[in-house]
Image: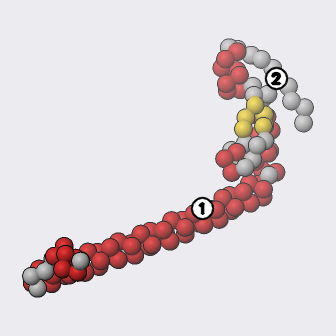
Amino acid sequence: MDMCCIFNGKIKEHLDESCPLRPLKCRFKEFGRNDILFQSNFEQHLQLKMERHLDLLLSYIGELRKELEYHQTCQEQIEKLRLEKKEQATQIRTLRKKNGKDGFSLITLLKVLK
């Protein structure tokens, strides 16, 4: 396909909107496509490379799933640690109460043992 530009009108509008030689980036750039296209072959590129574009999207979705699973595992571990911390705090309070009832503090006990 021969590409040519027939300028007509204001140059800025022509370059921004209608010039068939205006370079465009592939819509799938963020997924790994680095093609530089022209306005005149942009739609053709999207159709011809559809399978490759879908492969890129599937790969990207797979990576997102892995990342989500990792974050879910981290959240589960955080929740487990929070529960352990809460149980330990309860055990500490129980031991402090028991220690107070017996009339001994840890400091007193250490002095007696010296």
Give, as a three-letter code, the residue at label 2: Cys
Q: Is residue 71 visible?
A: yes
* Numbered label attached to residue 64: 1
Name which quarter of the figure residue 66 lies in: bottom right
> Does residue 103 lie above or below 37 as drawn?
below
State if disc 1 and disc 2 touch (CB < 8 Å): no
Q: Give how far across and how far down residue 21 sits, in percent.
A: 79, 28
Q: Residue furthest top?
A: 10
Q: Which residue is mark 2?
A: 5
Name which quarter of the figure residue 23 lies in: top right
Alpha-carbon distance for marks 2 and 1?
Answer: 42 Å
Whether residue 104 sits left or right of residue 31 in the image: it is left
User: Is the C terminus in the top left, top right, bottom left or bottom right quadrant?
Assistant: bottom left
Q: Name the residue: 59% across, 61% down.
A: 64
User: Is the N terminus in the top left, top right, bottom left or bottom right quadrant?
Assistant: top right
> Does residue 42 lie above or below 15 as drawn?
below
Q: Give how far across and how far down residue 65 sits, in percent.
A: 59, 66
